[in-house]
Every structure is written in C-alpha cells, then in structure tokens.
Image: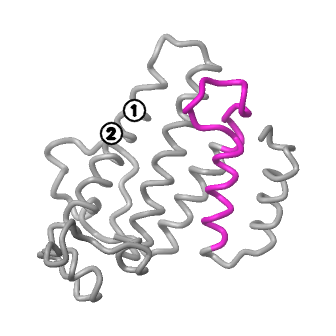
Amino acid sequence: LTTIASDDANKGSTPGDFGPSLDVDNFTLNADNFCVDRIWSGYYLAISRANQALSKLPLSPLDDATKNRLIAEVRFLRGYFYFNLVRFFGGVPKITIVPKPEDANNDEFQTRASADEIYSLIIEDLTFAVDNLPIKGATQVGRATKAAAQSMLAKVYLYQENWTKVLELTQAVISGSSGG
C-alpha cells in the first residue's frame, strides 16, 4: 500500500490490471477495499499470535535467558505490527492480552485507542527489545537484534519528531556501540 500511494510503484501486471489498487493510487480507499481489510486483518492476526506467545513464554521450561530473548523478539515484532497499523489507520484497538472467547466482543477490545496510546505501546515494546535482544553475531542470522530494535525505535521516534532520541539511537547503530 505504501509504495503504490507514494508513486514508488505502480500496481498491475498490465496497464489495465489495477483493480482495488487504483483506489490506493488515487487516495480513494474505503473500508470495502480488500487491500485495507487484508492489512487490518493480517496485522491483528500477527498481534494475536504475538500476544499468545507472550502469554505462554513465561510458563516455558526454557532457561530465563532464552525466555527473555524470545519475549524480546516477540515484543519487537508486536511493536513493528502496531507501528504499521498506527501509520495506516491512526488510533487502533490496543490489544496486549489474549482475550477469553466470551470477551471477544467486549468494548475494551473493539474501541480504538488514541494514536498516542499506540505509540506509547510501540515505544515500550521496542525499548524492551533494545534492552534484551542480543547483538548481531550473538544470535542466529535472521533473528531480531539489538541494532534492529534500535533502528526501528529510531524510526518510531522520527514519526514522533523526537529528534534527540532519533540521533541517540541512530548514532548507537552507526557507531557499532549496539553491536551492529
């Protein structure tokens, strides 16, 4: 959605093959567009899975260091998912637990939080990730690292116009003090 809307890309394998993506290109999206539904549904499915993992990891027989790293990885991902949602939709429902089936339609899980509340959650998740993820080279390739979390958090602060934090985090990544 973002590359089509920015004109960095055009949708379609043929000139007339736009379909619902033309609405993205023309900024005429609405809730009926399947692209919007897929973004919303996909990210909330991912958030649901992250919340499930966060509810189960503390109960795991894994050693504390491994559990903490895995929790940090999951929170990194949840922060990323919410960051994309808040940029697309502004305030969205803030769901940080696994609701019981009987609570699924509870207003608590259906009401939009403010964009500021979502950004606070994102910053909390990514800060936890920065503080608890290993440096590059101390984990398997493809897993989240401290520098990845710092970079993502810097991008969040960029959207918040917190230039001091952006500079602090990006300098840490560039200088390698975060472990690259």
Which image quadrant for residue 93?
A: bottom left
Residue closer to the observer: 141 or 158:
141
Q: Residue 134 in magenta?
A: yes
In the image, is 180 to the left or to the right of 93? Answer: right
Identify the residue position indicated by label 2 in the image: 49
The quadrant of the picture occupied by the N terminus is bottom left
Residue 20 part of the magenta segment: no
Q: Which mark is residue 53?
A: 1
How is colour applied across the structure in the image?
one colour
Q: Residue at x 72, y 27 (%)?
A: 137
The x and y percentages for residue 167 are 81, 67
Quarter of the picture holding the C terminus: top right
Q: Secondary structure at mark 1?
A: helix
Comparing 37 with 14, the one in front is: 14
When the figure is inspected, residue 87 is found, relative to residue 122, above or below; the finding is below
> Could you classify mark 2 by the number of other residues whose Cα lies within 10 Å: few (under 14), some (14-19), or many (20 or more)?
some
Q: Nearer the viewer, residue 100 or 65?
A: 65
Q: Residue furthest front?
A: 14
Q: Residue at x 56, y 23 (%)?
A: 67
Residue 107 picture quarter: bottom left
The foreground one among 21 and 33 is 21
Q: What distance separates the C-alpha of mark 1 from that of mark 2? A: 6 Å
Amino acid at the residue labelled 2: Arg
Q: Position of residue 11 (x, y in %)?
A: 27, 71
Residue at 14% across, 72% down: 17
Left or right, 22 with respect to 63, comes to: left
- The x, y position of residue 50, in whole percent, is 39, 40
Q: Which segment is the magenta one?
A: 130-158
Q: Do residues under tags 1 and 2 come within 8 Å of each other at their CB atoms?
A: yes
Q: Regarding mark 2 in the picture, which secondary structure is present there?
A: helix
